[in-house]
Amino acid sequence: MDKAMLFRTLWEATGQTLYMVGVSVVAAQILGMPLGVLLVISDKGHIAENRLLNKILSVIVNIGRSIPFIILLVAIIPFTRFIIGTYIGTTAAIVPLTVAAIPFVARVVESSLKEVDPGVIEAAQAMGASPWQIVYKVLLPEALPGLVLGFTLTAINLVGYSAMAGTVGGRGLGDLAIRFGYQRFRGDIIFYTVVILVVLVQLIQALGNWLARKLSRR
């Protein structure tokens, strides 16, 4: 592989990684945020207390977080095939990445919402706000900077998880480093992929920090 082809391959692999991570982050936020909100509002003494529901959801989230990603990747192959039609490829890798991120997002949301000042919630209740209005107009806006930082951490974790997506033919930078770098004894390919991954993580973290600061000043 000459240098021109190497850089084209690196560019393509970077695009595949960004595609996998980007779609997975969005899907995980859509599915994980409601779960995190339910964990908070159903807790003892909160606006929609339901201890049974809270315990069930907590157990589900804990189970999801306890399964190593490489095992989850293989374990849900039938589910991935059902959703995508195949378990091989970059798009197919999005399914296990999303499933792995959902419980993490739920805990991030739970942690951020629990940091909201209870006095603000009580004030909203005193004004006759419904539970939905408290969630939409009080909890989420007040916790927004923390949520952004949590979602940033989720994206960074998924960059790491995406490196394992080669197990199901997900391609991307991790797969490139293993197949063309490690297996073919090309140290330069491993070096370039590591550099790109480090840069991606730094950019994601910097963007998340900047956005969180902007939201905190409002």
Image: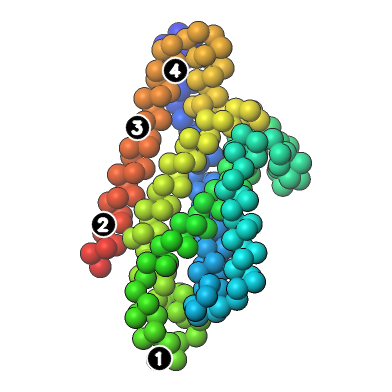
Q: Residue at x 29, y 62 (%)?
A: 215
Q: What's the colour scheme?
A: rainbow
Of callouts 2 and 1, the N-terminal one:
1
**Three-letter code, disc 2:** Arg
The label on residue 199 is 3
- At mark 3, the secondary structure is helix
Asked whether 11 or 218 is in front, the reply is 218
Mark 3 surroundings: few (<14), some (14-19) or many (≥20) residues within 10 A: few
Tag 1 residue: 126
The correct choice, above or below, for 133 with respect to 105 in the image is below
Q: Circle 4 is placed at which residue position? A: 190
Residue 74 position, x and y percent, is: 69, 35
Label whose residue precedes the other's in the sequence (1 or 4): 1
Residue 27 appears in the figure: no
Asked which secondary structure carries label 4, the reply is helix
Which kind of residue does numbered mark 4 sit on?
Ile
Mark 2 — residue? 213
Please tell me whether mark 2 sits on a helix, a strand or a loop: helix
Residues under numbered marks 2 and 3 in contact, where contact means CB atoms less than 8 Å apart: no
CA–CA distance between discs 4 and 2? 35 Å
